[in-house]
Image (cartoon, helix red, strand yellow):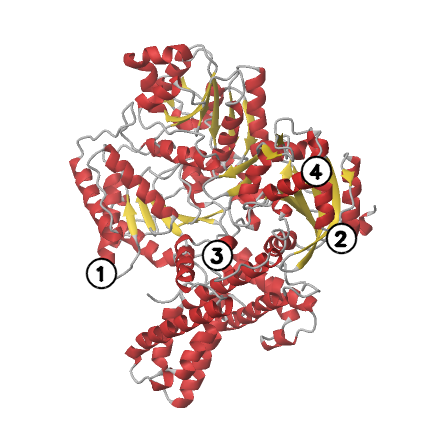
């Protein structure tokens, strides 16, 4: 096919070529038009696969078994041995999938299957394994956004995958393609488009063309291997996860090395790329190899022992039993536990203390596989040597995001040692530039604040300073106050009005104490209301290890058994006790640092609250700068000398993928770390990587915004002209242009230099266009269910980019209070302005009718502005009760149980399950055919009720 022809290749032609290629790969084509034919084919394929024959009544039992449970439960059913009672009463055992010998399954392809649920849908290409639809491929013509195919699969999940016998809920993987770009992802409705992945080769070269992807990823044996071995069932979230290509290649390399030799090796996967999942899958597979006695996953801190055990158990419930002390560790070596998670301190104690020798002796010559997490932190001392000497047949694998090379190595008791010296050959490499290119982590926006220039007197010292790094200057109260003032002035901008969180890493504990007390004083003075917390170990921290690039283990004074050692720095300890008292008062907790256990509990509580966005700013010295993942954390303030792996590890706390609003990791540096940053990036990627890792300058995003604005006014020169757009194609052009403007504005606003005066339109005009944009989004809701689907249906509107946290119900009420004090003519104009603001705010649109009704029916009778909030509260309370009564009457629901379901939804922030909602119905349940439609309708009403009357309302 020539280039010009392929550029306009239709969706039908792409689908036809795909099916032909799949048949060349030994998929058998089968024509299936509907669920009846799907079920008939399933019966034949299961009979072939298991060499049995089902009677009609026996197969009814099979279908009954298959129809039960959620997508997650069905994934478990797929992988386990099944049995029914035959007509004669004998038990019959059979497999739905041959998991052990994954090539020995039956592979088929079909296309254009019609299913009717809430709405009628027709699916593009379905891959059947043993008759079950396990892979669904959705295709868009060349030139269309891949995200549209992703949104289409979500729509199908919502509308029809659960219809009939719900066999399409057995889908394990989705593949989406527009011919040029092709991605895959697991069947998990909670994930976003950012959890979709390109396939690559072992050198991380992308395979995105549909034909090439089909011949590599969809080859029957490989596809079946991915489903059988490399999909992880996450027990915590009851969801499916699939390994990304670099994770797959790393695990395969480790397994091959364990099978074929006793050589060691290490995996270099950049920070934030999912090493825990990779190491878990490697551990899970290795522990079942007959030649392996134990798999020991080794971390170097007590908090990571707990954290890693928790994560491992989330991937497979009960897979590990966390070792709470050395005695428990030794017991796990002695019993039938195959996978152990422990700290290096406890492992060291187990092999050096005489009382454990007898229990550990038999493993000296057994094949024990050790997997070391962040091996650059834990494996450069005598402990590592002792482990090697004790376990004579040990095989060691290290995972690191920042290896030790000669350039960043430090001498210790073993001399100058690199990661290669200790672990041997690198088995797989995936560096930060690979991860950014694949959109698995974010770029960094590094802002260097100041030149640290000394003025005539220290009291006049400017924050913009020269390269003078003296203790006197860096810790002078005047400078510290200017740093704090800068943080307070820019924190909302950096964190999108505190939708995200931040950390502040400081050079040493005495300076941290000064910063903390400064922030607390300014809070008491009413200059900010940030929720602040801190944690530090209260040993001798003044001699800062990180100045040499090495992040310490987090609790700077750990004994060999992992317990915290308290040294003589009483002042630091007393300060920490006082700061924990502030924390307890702020969060209603009862923490302390009286001993190691109490300190650990405080650490864990802080970690939980940072992840839950309950802490706005966390002050640290070393802790949390490595091994801590929090997706809502987007900003790191730095007043600390960092370099090489210490710098990359610290910066990487901010660059976890979350949503469209989180466009980069913000690094605000109050020291001269420009050269150190460039050196670190060069060391851990390549000399040309700086531009790939750092976001572009402010001026570049400004230019991109202007280009998007130019495209927008070509389609809709005025706000009013959006309503007159004659075709859906032009509406789509407006949506894409405005969305590009939003994306670039989102990045621009994070720069300290941002001002609306730089943009070619005013904030008010932008918000007016936003209102029209949201109108088009609402239009897609009303088009669902129609025979002809709107081309806007599957466009991602990225509504979160419009969210302005300061524009909420309380803000609107404050505006309404001011309306009472103006003239009647002015009052009408002000009220309309308020309604226009609501129309442009995604989170307020559900409340627009409610607020408008309050304005029309209640506001004219209020005389005092202070009465507005109370009157609105009473009005909403009455309206909420009336709406709930209407809802339960319309759907014939049990009222008290409906209230309970709503409470559970608010607590868990997960929409109610359909089966739970159907139980609310009084009297007879809907028929099998009506259950899905009825359940979805009630769920939609419940969510609408919560969004209108509860979420975002002032307490």
Residue highlighted by disc 4:
55
Residue at point 28% right, 39% down?
Answer: 601
Q: Reading the chain from its start, which is encountered first: label 1 or label 4?
A: 4
Marks 2 and 3 sit apart, C-alpha to C-alpha, by 42 Å
- Within 10 Å of disc 3 (Cα), the crowding (few <14, some 14-19, many 20+) is some
Residue at point 52% right, 38% down?
Answer: 233
Counting from the top left corner in percent of width and height, residue 753 is at 44, 59
Look at the image and tell me in which quarter the C terminus lies. bottom left
Q: Reading the chain from its start, which is encountered first: label 1 or label 3?
A: 1
- Where on the picture, by quarter, is residue 897? bottom left
Counting from the top left corner in percent of width and height, residue 271 is at 47, 37
Marking on residue 525: 1
Residue at point 34% right, 78% down?
Answer: 817
Q: Secondary structure at mark 4?
A: loop
Marking on residue 919: 3
Marks 2 and 4 sit apart, C-alpha to C-alpha, by 41 Å
- Where on the picture, by quarter, is residue 426? top right
Q: Secondary structure at mark 1?
A: loop
């Amino acid at each position: 096919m020539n280039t010009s022809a392929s550029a306009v290749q239709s969706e039908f032609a792409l689908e036809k070529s795909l099916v032909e290629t799949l048949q060349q790969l030994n998929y058998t084509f089968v024509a299936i038009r509907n669920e009846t034919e799907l079920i008939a084919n399933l019966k034949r394929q299961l009979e072939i696969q298991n060499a049995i024959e089902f009677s009609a009544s026996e197969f009814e039992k099979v279908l009954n078994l298959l129809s039960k449970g959620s997508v997650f439960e069905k994934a478990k059913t797929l992988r386990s041995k099944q049995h029914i009672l035959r007509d004669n009463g004998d038990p019959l055992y059979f497999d739905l999938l041959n998991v052990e010998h994954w090539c020995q399954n039956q592979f088929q392809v079909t296309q254009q299957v019609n299913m009717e649920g809430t709405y009628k849908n027709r699916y593009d290409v379905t891959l059947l394994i043993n008759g079950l639809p396990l892979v669904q491929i959705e295709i868009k013509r060349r030139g269309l956004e891949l995200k549209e195919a992703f949104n289409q699969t979500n729509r199908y999940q919502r509308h029809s995958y659960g219809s009939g016998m719900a066999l399409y809920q057995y889908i394990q993987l989705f593949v989406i393609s527009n011919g040029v770009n092709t991605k895959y992802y697991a069947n998990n409705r909670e994930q976003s488009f950012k959890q979709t992945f390109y396939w690559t080769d072992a050198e991380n070269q992308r395979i995105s063309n549909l034909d090439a992807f089909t011949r590599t990823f969809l080859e029957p044996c490989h596809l079946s291997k991915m489903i059988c071995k490399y999909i992880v069932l996450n027990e915590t979230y009851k969801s499916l996860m699939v390994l990304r290509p670099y994770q797959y290649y790393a695990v395969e390399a480790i397994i091959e090395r364990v099978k074929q030799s006793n050589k060691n090796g290490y995996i270099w996967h950049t920070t934030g790329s999912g090493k825990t999942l990779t190491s878990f899958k490697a551990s899970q597979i290795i522990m079942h190899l007959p030649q392996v006695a134990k798999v020991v996953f080794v971390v170097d801190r007590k908090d990571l022992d707990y954290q890693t055990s928790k994560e491992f158990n989330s991937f497979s419930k009960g897979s590990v039993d966390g070792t709470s002390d050395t005695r428990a560790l030794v017991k796990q070596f002695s019993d039938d536990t195959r996978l152990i998670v422990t700290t290096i301190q406890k492992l060291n104690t187990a092999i050096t203390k005489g009382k454990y020798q007898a229990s550990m002796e038999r493993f000296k010559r057994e094949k024990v596989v050790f997997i070391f997490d962040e091996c650059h932190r834990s494996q450069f001392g005598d402990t590592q040597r002792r482990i090697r000497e004790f376990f004579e047949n040990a095989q060691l694998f290290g995972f690191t995001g920042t290896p030790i090379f000669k350039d960043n190595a430090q001498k210790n008791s073993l001399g100058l040692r690199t990661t290669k010296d200790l672990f041997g050959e690198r088995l797989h490499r995936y560096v930060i530039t690979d991860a950014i290119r694949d959109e698995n982590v974010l770029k960094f926006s590094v802002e260097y604040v100041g030149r640290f220039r000394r003025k005539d007197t220290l009291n006049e010292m400017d924050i913009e300073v020269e390269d003078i790094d003296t203790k006197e200057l860096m810790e002078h109260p005047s400078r510290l106050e200017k740093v704090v003032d800068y943080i307070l002035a820019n924190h909302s901008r950096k964190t999108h009005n505190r939708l995200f969180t931040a950390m502040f890493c400081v050079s040493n504990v005495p300076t941290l104490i000064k910063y903390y007390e400064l922030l607390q004083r300014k809070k008491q003075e009413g200059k900010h209301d940030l929720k602040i917390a801190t944690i530090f170990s209260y040993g001798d921290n003044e001699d800062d290890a990180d100045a040499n690039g090495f992040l310490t283990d987090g609790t700077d004074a750990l004994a060999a058994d992992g317990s915290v050692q308290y040294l003589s720095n009483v002042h630091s300890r007393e300060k920490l006790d006082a700061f924990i008292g502030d924390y307890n008062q702020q969060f209603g907790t009862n923490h302390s640092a009286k001993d190691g256990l109490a300190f650990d509990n405080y650490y864990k509580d802080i970690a939980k609250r940072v992840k839950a966005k309950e802490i706005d700013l966390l002050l640290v010295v070393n802790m949390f700068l490595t091994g801590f993942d929090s997706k809502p954390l987007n900003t790191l303030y730095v007043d600390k000398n960092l370099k090489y792996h210490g710098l990359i590890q610290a910066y990487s706390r901010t660059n976890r993928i979350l949503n469209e609003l989180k466009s980069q990791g913000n690094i605000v540096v109050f020291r001269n770390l420009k050269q150190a940053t460039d050196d670190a990036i060069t060391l851990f990627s390549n000399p040309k990587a700086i531009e790939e890792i750092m976001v572009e300058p402010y001026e570049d995003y400004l230019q991109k915004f202007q280009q998007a604005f130019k495209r927008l006014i070509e389609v809709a020169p005025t706000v009013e002209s959006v309503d007159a757009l004659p075709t859906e194609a032009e509406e789509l052009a407006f949506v894409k242009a405005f969305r590009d403007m939003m994306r670039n504005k989102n990045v621009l606003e994070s720069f300290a230099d941002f001002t609306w005066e730089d943009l070619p339109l005013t904030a008010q005009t932008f918000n007016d266009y936003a209102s029209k944009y949201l109108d088009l989004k609402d239009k897609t809701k009303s088009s669902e269910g129609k025979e002809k689907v709107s081309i806007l249906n599957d466009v991602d509107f990225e509504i979160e980019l419009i969210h302005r946290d300061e524009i909420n119900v309380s803000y609107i009420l404050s505006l309404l209070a001011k309306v009472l004090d103006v003239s009647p003519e002015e009052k009408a104009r002000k009220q309309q302005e308020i309604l226009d603001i609501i129309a442009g705010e995604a989170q307020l649109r559900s409340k627009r009718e409610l607020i408008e009704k309050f304005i029309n029916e209640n506001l004219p009778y209020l005389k005092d502005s202070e009465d507005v909030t109370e009157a609105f509260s009473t009005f909403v309370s009455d309206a909420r009760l009336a709406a709930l009564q209407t809802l339960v009457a319309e759907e014939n629901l049990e009222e008290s149980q409906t209230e309970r379901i709503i409470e559970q939804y608010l607590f868990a922030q997960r929409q109610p399950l359909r089966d739970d909602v159907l139980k609310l119905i009084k009297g007879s349940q809907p028929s099998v055919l009506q259950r899905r439609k009825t359940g979805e309708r009630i769920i939609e009403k419940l969510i609408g009720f919560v969004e209108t009357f509860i979420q975002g309302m002032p307490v």
